[in-house]
Image: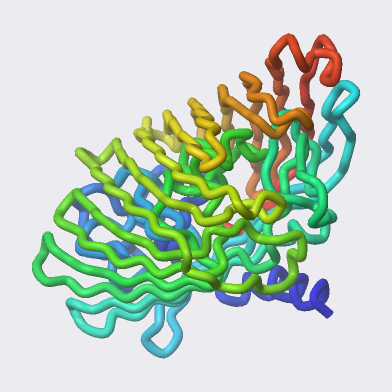
Amino acid sequence: MRRLAFALLFVASPALAQSGVGDMSGMPMPSPAPTQSASQPQQSSAGDMKSMSGMEGTADTGLLGSYPMTRDSSGTSWQPDASAHAGIHSMLDGWSIMAHATLWGIYDSQSGPRGDTMIFAPGMLMVSARRDLDPSNTLNFRVMLSPDPFMGRRGYPLLLASGETANGTTPLVDHQHPHDLFMELSGTYSHDFTQEDSAFLYLGYPGEPALGPSAFMHRVSSMDIPEAPITHHWMDSTHVTFGVATAGFVHDDWKIEVSQFTGREPDQYRFDFDQPRFDSTSVRLTWNPDAHWSLQTSWGHLNSPEQLTPSVNENRVTASATYFTPLGDGSSFAATLGWGLKDLSDGAHLNGLLLEAEYKPARWWTTFARAEWEQNNELSASGTVHDVGELTLGGIRDWPIAPQLAFGLGASYTYDFVSTAIIPSYGSDPHGLLGFARLTLD
């Protein structure tokens, strides 16, 4: 029945559509908005507070204050104001309903003794409902689902990835864990005091606390990269957390927010709801200095994040800078530089660095690159810290195949760098190759 319900949600989502294109209320889309013309929707940008064509009656400000809606990203995180937003839009009894769905089909081949080969289909379906109660008060609800649990508890092969567990008894290493069926069930309320000042409250079960940059599948610099970064658990792994309460204050281009949330990572049962504990705390400061940049720094104390080492707590520190600029005629460039530190109570201090970028030379073409380095103590049974990294290059070509539906084909190659001590277990030339197709409801 769960499989049937999920399939019906994917199939039924186009029924939400009317002919408008609008803000996803926290979800950047996998492709930039088309070049504007007299017959196309007007894209909102920094400082442009006009209503978007085809969205009469819908506010064009952000969820958390009177800034451009394009600033909103996953959870309560921000992205550059210049970022493009698009999605299926409809009005229902005063509510603005917005939807988006992406489904990948991926062939994944990871080399060497610790590699594997797999075909799997990750993706997501997101629906949000926004109501502007009056000019100063906004209410929003968001539901996000993922087909990841159907790929199996081990997730998909990804050399040098680590974090969580597949079976409750052994660590999940060289695999990226699947996301839970319910990635987000959240509500947000915001109140504007002035044009520049507002306060907000975000509740999620599950949800995303104020820790790290936007989640990788929603970042403008990585939404077309089909695999997770190996530094995921250094920066944005808390984007699916069972129990989140965030309160924040926005002043113009600044945002300060505090979250109380469940520190434990989701368990190996991906179809259920984990126990909310609200035993961990985070603080994040974000600044958008102009339309092209979004900068954040955050700190979090995670109580017992890994179920296999319940006595180990983590203090996490992150900092990131995301850049986006449209280049005209559907072309754009986006990049993120991020750093994360896991300071564990057992004495380990583990750094991670990420640099990723996407360049769209034309409306339906995307090239991407990602470089990472991390200090990882989960790759060998001894717990020794190893310096490892990887470099990924790839691209995807999309085609419009129906109104508001696109199909894409692409490939990527990853070269992995490992320390001398673990070369025997990974082989002399560790690498990964992905071929993929994508359907996007946009």
Give residue 332's quadrant in the image. Answer: top left
Residue at the (53%, 49%) spot, across then down: 313
Q: Give the total number of marks visible in the rendering.
A: 0
Residue at the (35%, 80%) spot, across then down: 131
* Up-down relation of residue 311 to residue 433 (above or below): below
Would residue 232 be seen by someone viewing this image from the given angle? yes
Q: Position of residue 87 (x, y in %)?
A: 50, 60
Residue at the (70%, 34%) spot, across then down: 378
Q: Nearer the viewer, residue 112 or 289?
A: 112
**Residue lying at the far bottom of the rendered structure:** 93
Q: Quadrant location of the C terminus?
A: bottom right
Q: Nearer the viewer, residue 378 or 88?
A: 378
* Up-down relation of residue 397 to residue 244 (above or below): above
Would residue 127 be seen by someone viewing this image from the given angle? no
Q: Position of residue 200 (x, y in %)?
A: 27, 69
Q: Quadrant location of the N terminus?
A: bottom right
Q: Nearer the viewer, residue 292 or 145?
A: 145
* Up-down relation of residue 286 to residue 279 (above or below): above
Q: Position of residue 233 (x, y in %)?
A: 57, 42
